[in-house]
Image: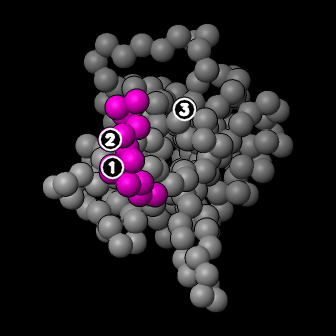
């Protein structure tokens, strides 16, 4: 069994009541695969399904190497590959790809993401699959405020903040599961922000 096998359980969730999706709209889907094999799955998808776009989202993380801070890319959702622009008649073949464990589907049998799942996938594609550093400041009460970046959409889901490391733990919901991930942010001076907003 894969290292992330526990994440494969209970991925079938109830579709939001009243949720609709136009078959003419851009559709997003998600595959669960063996952890560490995401790039292999992406290569297979691009080879087997012309026109498809696929990403295995990563986040930027700073680490100190040789006395210097460098950025490295770390998997955001290990074992998950998002895709879009696939022909409806061929999506079922994805389960046959090497290292793929399953195509995520909802209880009603649909595979295309909708609601918050679709918004998350769309945002990740818009970012090119890379979640960079958000911009934030701290008010007089030492409460963090996100100005822009990936954390902006998740400010209400921030559970912990490490001000020294400039990272925040945030809860991200995906296909009925909750992921807790640490994401980096850049801090600007609060006075600068107040002055800017007053212009």
Characterize the local packing of mark 3: few (<14), some (14-19) or many (20 or more) Cα atoms within 10 angstroms.
many
The residues bearing labels 2 and 3 have C-alpha atoms spaced at a distance of 31 Å
Q: Residue at x 36, y 40 (%)?
A: 195
Look at the image and tell me whether residue 134 can be seen: yes
Q: Residue at x 32, y 41 (%)?
A: 194
Q: Position of residue 11 (x, y in %)?
A: 39, 45
Q: Nearer the viewer, residue 193 or 75?
A: 193
Does residue 62 belong to the magenta stretch?
no
Q: Residue at x 74, y 43 (%)?
A: 45
Mark 2 lies on a secondary structure that is: helix
Q: Nearer the viewer, mark 1 or mark 3?
A: 1
Look at the image and tell me whether residue 176 can be seen: no
Mark 1 lies on a secondary structure that is: helix
Q: Position of residue 63 (x, y in %)?
A: 54, 77
Q: Which residue is mark 3?
A: 122
User: Would residue 29 appear left or right of 181 to someone viewing this image?
Assistant: right
Characterize the local packing of mark 1: few (<14), some (14-19) or many (20 or more) Cα atoms within 10 angstroms.
few
Q: Which residue is mark 2?
A: 194
Quarter of the figure with the C terminus: top left
Q: Are marks 2 and 1 in contact (CB under 8 Å)?
A: yes
User: Would residue 59 appear left or right of 47 to someone viewing this image?
Assistant: left
Q: Are marks 2 and 3 in contact (CB under 8 Å)?
A: no
The label on residue 134 is none
Q: Mark 3 or mark 2, which is nearer the start of the sequence?
A: 3
Tell me the magenta residue range: 186-199
The label on residue 191 is 1
Q: Nearer the viewer, residue 65 or 91?
A: 65
Q: Is residue 166 above or below residue 146?
A: below
Quarter occupied by residue 58: bottom right
Q: Position of residue 182 (x, y in %)?
A: 40, 62
The residues bearing labels 2 and 1 have C-alpha atoms spaced at a distance of 5 Å
């Amino acid at each position: 069994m894969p290292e992330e096998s526990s994440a494969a359980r209970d991925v079938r969730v109830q579709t939001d009541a009243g949720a609709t999706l136009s078959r003419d709209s851009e559709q997003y889907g998600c595959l669960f695969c063996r952890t560490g094999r995401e790039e292999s799955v992406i290569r297979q998808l691009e080879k087997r399904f012309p026109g498809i776009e696929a990403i295995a989202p990563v986040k930027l993380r700073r680490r100190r190497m040789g006395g210097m801070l460098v950025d490295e890319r770390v998997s955001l959702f290990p074992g998950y590959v998002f895709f879009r622009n696939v022909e409806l008649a061929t999506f079922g073949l994805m389960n046959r790809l090497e290292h793929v464990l399953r195509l995520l589907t909802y209880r009603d049998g649909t595979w295309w993401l909708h609601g918050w799942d679709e918004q998350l996938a769309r945002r990740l594609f818009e970012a090119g699959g890379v979640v960079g550093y958000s911009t934030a400041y701290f008010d007089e009460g030492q409460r963090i405020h996100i100005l822009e970046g990936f954390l902006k959409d998740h400010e209400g889901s921030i559970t912990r903040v490490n001000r020294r490391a400039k990272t925040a733990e945030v809860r991200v919901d995906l296909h009925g599961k909750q992921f807790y991930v640490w994401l980096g942010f850049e801090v600007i001076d609060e006075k600068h922000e107040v002055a800017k907003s007053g212009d």
